[in-house]
Image (tube, rainbow, N blue to C red):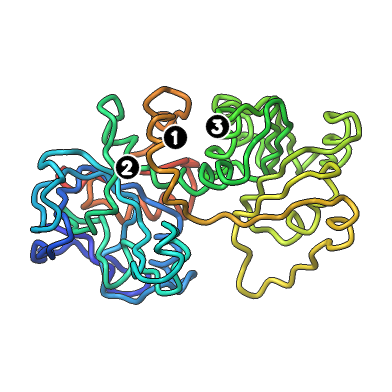
Amino acid sequence: MKAAVWTDYGKIEIKEVPVPEIGKNEALLKVRAAGVCVTDLHVFTGKFLYGKPPHILGHEICGEIVKTGEDAKDLPLGMRVVVETSVGCGKCDECKKGNRHLCANREEIGTAPYAGGYAQYVKVPAQNVVPVADNVSDEEAAIFESVVCPCGGLMRLGVKFGETVAVFGVGPAGIAFIQTAKALGAGRVIAIARNRKRLERVLHFGADEIICSADEDVAARLSQLTDGKGVDLICETTGAEKIIEETADYIANGGRILLYGLPAENSDISFPVKSIIMKQAQVDGVENNPFVWRPLMKLVSGGRINLKDMVTHTFSLDKIEDAFSLLENKKEDPIKIVVYPWK
């Protein structure tokens, strides 16, 4: 089969490699489309040290089941699926509770020993496949995983009807938070970022207000929009030290802060503990969420989450280096990129 093999930091090669041999609890998927995640770019370049080359990356996968192991015969051949990325040990307390994403020995599809979706075929644990709704395209399904963490975080934390939600950052995660907050009943969603052009496009995805931090006073504007009370919920996607440190300044009494953006390894964040205590604020982190995949598929299928317009560029697998270059240089400012292994 054809695969894009990460051979060294900053280097990827299209090679012919063997089709994976599956185990008794695994399924073989024909990869129909795969999303290109900025995490893959950071691993590829060595900015994020997660696994080592040589390896096949790619954790945003839409595939078709073409073969199953002897203990996975209940999975119908030909079914289109997306792939939940976390693989737990199956034995620890977290795995037994269904939280395989919190397993201390967790592994990830796309990270050794599990090859990823930048190939024509990929093998995955049978329990990690989620059926794709008939009215959801391969392209939409390919980026489905990218909205799971934001949606899962809000599903776990909850969005109360009519609340005001502020989202810092308007990349794919920010757009996912905006759409999910609206789908779960937020009354007003405010998007904050430095780039006005990128801000303006999130109005299409449901943002009610935008604040350009490059030329507006964020604190003053949020105070104005909330009558001085502060926002009920903040979703932080940038990982920027200054923004994380200031979140407690913007939150209402009894509000919640959801942290998603990862700060740099050498960050020295001074967290506003006193403000959090005095405001009785709640601070949560966001990771994967096995329980959100199927409910989220219903939201996408029902038109509540717009994945179609998040895909701004597509490439054949042969051009994956061009996809990485576009994502890194951002000349055309992509939201999400999809590659097709069979084109």
Q: Residues within 10 Å of mark 3 (few under 14, many from 20)?
A: many
Q: Is residue 175 above or below residue 149?
A: above
Q: Nearer the viewer, residue 297 or 119?
A: 297
Q: Which mark is residue 89?
A: none
Residue 119 shown left or right of residue 236 in the figure: left
| Residue 116: percent from left, percent from top | 27, 60
Residue 170 shown left or right of residue 20 in the figure: right
Q: Is residue 157 above or below residue 239?
A: above
Q: As shown in the figure, which amino acid type bears the numbered disc 1?
A: Met
Q: Which mark is residue 179?
A: 3
Q: Residues within 10 Å of mark 2 (few under 14, many from 20)?
A: many
Q: As shown in the figure, which amino acid type bears the numbered disc 3?
A: Gln
* First-in-chain label (1 vs 3): 3
* First-in-chain label (1 vs 2): 2
Q: Which mark is residue 142?
A: 2
Q: Nearer the viewer, mark 1 or mark 2?
A: 2
| Residue 215: percent from left, percent from top | 80, 39
Residue 216 image-quadrant placement: top right
Q: Residues within 10 Å of mark 1 (few under 14, many from 20)?
A: some
Disc 1 to disc 3: CB gap under 8 Å: no
Residue hosting label 1: 310
Q: CA distance from mark 1 to mark 3?
A: 11 Å
